[in-house]
Amino acid sequence: MTFYKQGYIIIRKLITKEESKEMFDHLSSRKDGSLEDEQSINTPSFYGDDLMRKYQSKLHPDIEKSTGLDLFKTYTYARVYKRGDILRIHRDREACEISITLDLGGDPWDIWVLDRDENPVKITLNAGDALVYRGCEIHHWRGKFEGDKHVQVFMHFVDKYGQYAWAKDDKVK
């Protein structure tokens, strides 16, 4: 299946174990994360982290190749999840037209999507793997986290020639 047909794809080993560890350690050591994210209350989150933005730029060509689209970067958002966290079913706002969720490590935690026929699909990622999906179209969620810690970064893009191109360089949290 292709990104065009199903609205999402999985990219195994998008980044190396070393890159994943660098990002995991960086986010885990930050003590200044916001705890006010309505999707995951009391979970440290980081909008526009410099290291995450560096990797977003580095991965930009890979995401374009995987989707077959010319993309503008919008923003990055990372979370350090803890036991009991839940990510309720949702779709993303316009600045997240094309999104990746990049697993940086910790205890495993599956992500779910509704395919275009509205069937739930469980996706298991390992550190360094990414799910690329149409954030405004594809419903996605995670059940209750049973592990101790899971670190994830979301990198968002919009189609340069699409209806949300105006959202490039997003500055809204």
Image (cartoon, rainbow, N blue to C red):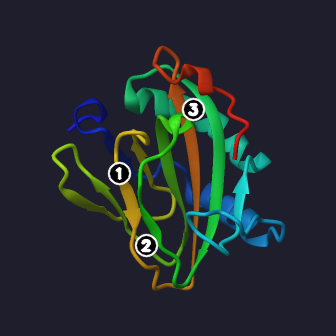
- Residue type for callout 3: His
Q: Is the C-beta separation of discs 2 and 1 under 8 Å?
A: no
Q: Is the C-beta separation of discs 1 and 3 under 8 Å?
A: no
Q: Is residue 80 above or below residue 82?
A: above
Q: Position of residue 70 (x, y in %)?
A: 49, 19
- Residue type for callout 2: Trp
Q: What's the distance in space between the residues labelled 2 and 1, CA to CA? A: 17 Å
Kind of element beneath mark 3: helix
Q: Position of residue 57 (x, y in %)?
A: 66, 34
Q: Nearer the viewer, residue 92 or 112?
A: 92
Residue ID at (45%, 75%): 108
Q: What's the distance in space between the residues labelled 3 and 2, CA to CA? A: 25 Å
Residue ID at (38%, 68%): 110
The quarter of the displayed image where residue 73 is located: top right
Q: Which residue is mark 1?
A: 139
At label 3, counting other C-alpha atoms closer than 10 Å, the crowd grade (few under 14, some 14-19, many 20 or more) is some
- Residue type for callout 1: His
The quarter of the displayed image where residue 109 is located: bottom left
Q: Which residue is mark 3?
A: 60
Q: Position of residue 98 (x, y in %)?
A: 46, 36
First-in-chain label (1 vs 3)? 3
At label 1, counting other C-alpha atoms closer than 10 Å, the crowd grade (few under 14, some 14-19, many 20 or more) is many
Residue ID at (72%, 69%): 35
First-in-chain label (2 vs 1)? 2
Q: Which residue is mark 2?
A: 109
Q: Position of residue 114 (x, y in %)?
A: 26, 53
Q: What's the distance in space between the residues labelled 1 and 3, CA to CA? A: 23 Å
Q: Which mark is residue 116?
A: none
Q: Is residue 168 left or right of residue 120?
A: right
Q: Is residue 73 visible?
A: yes
Q: Is the C-beta separation of discs 3 and 2 under 8 Å?
A: no
First-in-chain label (3 vs 2)? 3
